[in-house]
Image (cartoon, coloured by chain):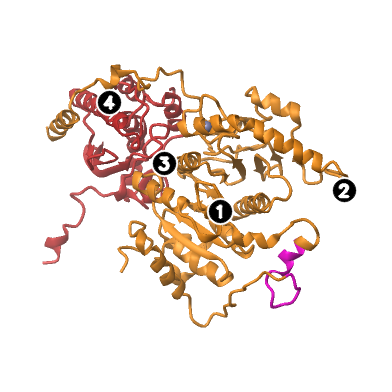
Amino acid sequence: MLCAPGCLFCSAKIEEHIVQVMSTVKAGTSRRSKVKDMSAEVVDSNPYSRLMALQRMGIVENYEKIRDFSVSIVVSKGVQSAITDILTKGGRSRLHIWDVDTGLLGNVSHHFFHREQVGMTKTDAAVQTLSDINPDVILESYSLNITTVKGFEVFMESLRRRNSKNDGNGRNTGVDLVLSCVDNYEARMVVNQACNELNQTWIESGVSEDAVSGHIQLLIPGERACFACAPPLVEAELALRGLRHYVFGVVASGVDERTLKREGVCAASLPTTMGVIAGLLVQNALKFLLKFGEVSPYLGYNSLKDYFPTMEMKPNPQCVNSACLERQKEYLLEKPARDALAKAKIEAEASPKNEIPLHTDNEWHISVLDDSDISALLSDELPKGLTRELPCADEHQEAAMLGDTSVLADDTDLEELQRQLDALNAS
Amino acid sequence: MEEWDSSTKSALTQIPLLSIRAGPRDGAAWTQRLKEEYRALIAYTTMNKSNDNDWFRISAANPDGTRWTGSCWYVHNLRRYDFLLQFDIPVTYPATSPEIELPQLDGKTHKMYRGGKICLTVHFKPLWAKNSPRFGIAHALCLGLAPWLAAEVPILVDSGMVKHKDEEAPSAESCA
Ligand SMILES: [Zn+2]
């Protein structure tokens, strides 16, 4: 028996747990059987024919590679259902789903829950539902708070664990990509910490607390700004009104938010905004994994203005996250090899192919920044209508620097201090 | 700072600042940070008592000092309302603040995230970020929890969501 549904401290029992969840799938639902090879044949019985058509059209080189990838999704709410649903239909091979809370009745409307699943953890319910949608996907579910020391260790362990397909690939982890769909700054900082330490590329996503805008961001440790490198962005007017993004969230200026208030509630929720962000996130995850198109370093979405700003963020050499600084150092050391590779690639591509012109029009109102815009951003100027949501830390004299023993020489007994506080507490 | 009332501000300025940037995964440096946390909590508690404004009890619930439990109270209409108080020190501490929980009030107010985490004012996180790593647990209680209790307890009591312990049906006796 498990101590609680999804209790991760019984990590040895995870597999048993998965089996248990899978076996609770309702009898009588028509479930298709597993598909061994992804065939391109267009017949009703082949669920992958339309996906494989991407290959025939020359958009994707090898869609079947999707089955070799392993993706870890960290969710707290909201975007989860849309994301895992799309990923599952896309035929992914291994999916970790991380979550922090047990499904409550209030979640039924916008998550995977079917009524009979109330009381299961959200991830277990997701695993059950998704197995129905696509039995080819191997799903693992986890439910615990990753911001705690213990939860973080389990999270790191799950990312490190390898499967046969991607073992020995020279990476630190057993996953190809981490997708973050959490709803708070603290959890994002934890995903950032883990990915910096493991040198794991991840895509961050978020919907603003007023539910009308959102963003996705590709984070490559050492190469791009990590989540701790720069304070999150927010639209200036919203910041003044107390509507927060705990994200690098972006919205256009000029929208009248006078009707938006934050009285009596923490956050709003709009399933369509979440659906759009989930779609953008998974689309870019597919592009990243299958190497087609370009993945924007940052893509914002303002639903009120249909505005999609993009921008690039270089890592901060003064980042407070020490793992980020280590990755930055490594990235610089690898520069000569990277340049040589890029040069060779350009030469190889010099032989002209039938190229499709880029951006013949701009009907989707996507704003793309050119090089001069990007260099402007690096001097800490932000696109119109954006401001930093949190200030940079003030200049601070680090006390705990290596070799500085002045503070570490504080040899007052910790227990003595505890006793003093206890005495105060008792009086 | 114009968002906080004058008593919060004056209390804040008297809590000792911390100096060590270390979280629960940082071994010996964390132990040093913990000492600073204790010093700040001792100073803050002493100050509250001498100002006749004692309002919380908190102590480490595990040897590593990564989980803290205790209680807090608020006086409304001359009656005292007590609540259990708990939080974990996040792995990214002190870059991110502890998320303070009042588990008994979970589900009773919208000014709360799931699990009974209080919904802090929009001014709290910017101030915390600006002052990292100088703010500690005592500052989080002073700037985060105290204003929350002052704003929400009166509403919870007046709407009947929270009852004074004298008004709650004495469960065992009433069944007899
Ligand atoms: Zn960084």
Q: Which amino acid does label 2 sit on?
A: Lys
What x and y, as percent, mark residue A244? 53, 37
Q: Badge 4: how crowded within 10 Å, few (<14), some, or many (20+)?
A: many
Mark 4 or 1, closer to the camera:
4
Find out whether residue A51 is within the magenta segment: yes
- In magenta, the rendered stretch is A40-54
Name the side, left or right, on which A219 lies relative to B108. Answer: right
When asked about the image quadrant of residue A332, the answer is top right
The chain coloured orange carries which letter? A
Residue corresponding to mark 4:
B36
Residue A79 is tagged as 1
Q: What element carries label 1?
A: loop
Task: Determine the colour of chain B.
Answer: red
Q: What residue type is labelled 4?
A: Glu
Marks 4/1: CA distance?
A: 40 Å
Name the side, left or right, on which A233 lies relative to B57. Answer: right
Q: Main secondary structure of the magenta part?
A: loop
Residue corresponding to mark 2:
A353
Residue B119 is tagged as 3
Q: Which of marks 3 and 4 is nearer the N terminus?
A: 4
Do dots 2 and 1 share one subunit?
Answer: yes
Task: Report if the beta carbon of the residue with label 3 is closer than 8 angstroms to ligand 1.
Answer: no
